[in-house]
Amino acid sequence: MPEDERIIATGRVVRTRTVRELDAYAIEREPLPMPAAGEVRLRVRACGVGYVDALHATGRYQLAATVPFVPGVEVAGEIDAIGPEVEGLAVGMRVIPLMSVRGGFADHVVAPAVQIARIPDAMSFAEAAAIRANWLTAMHALVDRGGVASGETVLVIGAAGGVGGAAVQLAKRLGARVVATGSSEAKRDFARRLGADMAIDTDPEGWRDRLAEACGGSGPDIVVDPVCGPLFEPAFRSLAWNGRHLVIGFAGGPIPSLKANLPLLKGAMLVGVDVRQFNLRQPERAEANRALLRQWLAEGSVGAPVGATFPFERHREALDHAASGAGLGKTVLLMD
């Protein structure tokens, strides 16, 4: 890139100085970021927007965001600049980073070259931007923490959401039988289209009986729970012997509690799933998961359902929608 272009070229970025209210976010212009050694710069075409992104953007996440703050960690785009010491990549390639980026609500981001994966030709940028976080979370949950085995029954709560939808697909891929929950018939149909064998409602009244019927008279071996709402305790009480309840998030509102005698009586485990700490504390295992996801991408055998999409100018609406839990699939912000 010519030296003068480094000064003249600018891009759009969504930024806030407060990280408290969505109204505080505004589109600004700034010089394009330059890739250093071992890095590439992406022209961002789409950015995934999840529930955690919405929490982080409004200062409600467990880790406080530093200001000024730009939302978005999950992008898809084209390489448009390459730093020194990068091999095997070229300008124009359609790619996603397999680790979080900083400031994805922007026209350009910089990412480590070693974490770049090609996007299949048949996959849209929107779908590519919806894959990484949800699939890597589901992989860590079901495989590393849940130890899912072929033939087991997996209950996925919130199956129409991003993580829930990925968990449905992954559990089926690994040979499990999947029972999904959905608060509406549209959400239950959505889960069935993703591969769920059965889908049941979320009305707590008589819910355990309906779950037992869906599980063939017993209970699930694993509960995938990114919601931890009113069904948290009923789901744990329904677990089969040696069951595992995987706590992924709290989209259901206030954090629930569980009586300590229940794991003893059920011979069951309440298991935390924290991908961020997994990446920090077990980097080799985390890299193995990314390598497997890279392989599936290359094979074209993995995908993610895209829900509502929003143009760049409607970034506040995208965050608000992701926080609502009302949509089907992953919310995506489109840059063009």
Image: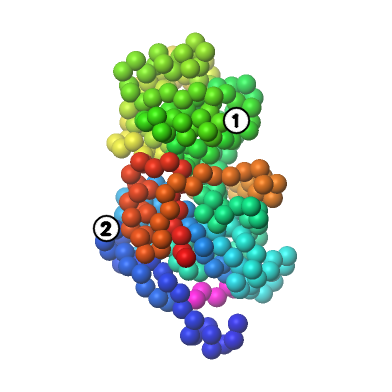
Residue flagged by tag 1: what amino acid is it?
Lys
Residue 309 in sight here: yes
On the rendered structure, is 286 left or right of 102? right
Does residue 34 show up magenta in the picture?
yes
- Residue in the image at 69% along x and 50% along y: 298
Disc 2 element? loop
Residue 21 sits in which quadrant? bottom left
Does residue 29 show up magenta in the picture?
no
- Residue in the image at 46% along x and 31% along y: 189
Q: Are marks 2 and 1 in contact (CB under 8 Å)?
A: no
Residue 68 sits in which quadrant? bottom left
| Label ID, residue 21 | 2
Q: Position of residue 201 (x, y in %)?
A: 38, 25
Q: Position of residue 194 (x, y in %)?
A: 54, 35
Q: Which residue is mark 1?
A: 172
On the rendered structure, is 15 left or right of 146? left
Return the disc, 2 or 1, that comes first in the chain's sequence. Answer: 2
Segment tinted magenta in the rendering: 32-36
Which of 106/273 is in front?
106
